Image (tube, rainbow, N blue to C red):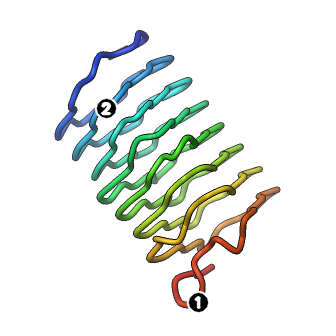
Amino acid sequence: LSLHDALPIFEFRGIHFKDCDFSGSWFDNCTFLDCTFTKCDLPAVGLGGCTISNCTFLDCSMQSILVLGGCWSGENVIEGDSRVNGMLVKNGCRWDGRTTFRKSDLTSAIIKELELSGHLNIEDCTLWYAQIGGMDGRGWERLSISGCDLHGALVVDYERLPKGDNLSN
């Protein structure tokens, strides 16, 4: 499967995408519900106002991902040999529920103007030049960063991070 043009509004439900190439695709106001992406290439992909809920990304290559607005809800997992390089999250995107990055590389990820609630877990990952700031984390139930290698990572607006028992590292 190769998708290179802008896609109309769709709801993708329970689909297993395997060995797919989404190069240069733009998804506008689409919903991905209970989907699995295995060994997919997602270079230069845009997600404008999309909802991603209860999805798993296994061994995927995600380069130059642009997430504008929209919502990640339910339980989403990015894991395995997944590489996230150049992810830009902004424009009031919301991450609700539980989002987990596990055993993945995050390089040049810029996360700002993000509303987080629920749980964000970053486990056994390598973060290269990641920038996190300008977020509204007052609704976070838990932020956990554990077993990670941090190389040039920058976290700003530290005072907006959850306090006390809600933050672990």
Is the residue 80 above or below the residue 67 in the image?
below
Which quadrant is the C terminus positioned in?
A: bottom right
Disc sitting over residue 128 in the figure:
none
The residue under label 2 is 18
Q: Type of residue at label 2?
A: Lys
Question: In the image, what residue occupies the spot 29% across and 42% down?
Answer: 36
In the rendered image, residue 45, in percent from the top left (x then y), is placed at 50, 26
Q: Type of residue at label 1?
A: Gly
Q: Is residue 66 left or right of residue 35?
A: right
Residue found farthest to the bottom: 165
Where disc 1 sits, the SS reads helix
- For residue 107, which quarter of the picture? top right
Which of pointers 1 and 2 lies earlier in the amino acid sequence?
Answer: 2
- For residue 59, which quarter of the picture? top left
Question: In the image, what residue occupies the spot 47% across and 72% down?
Answer: 140
Q: Name the residue nearer the viewer: 160 or 46.
A: 160
Where disc 2 sits, the SS reads strand
Is the residue 30 above or below the residue 89 in the image?
above
Q: Name the residue nearer the viewer: 92 or 131.
A: 92
Is the residue 29 above or below the residue 82 in the image?
above
Q: Name the residue nearer the viewer: 21 or 122.
A: 122
Marks 1 and 2, how far apart at CA: 41 Å
The residue under label 1 is 164
Q: Nearer the viewer, mark 1 or mark 2?
A: 1
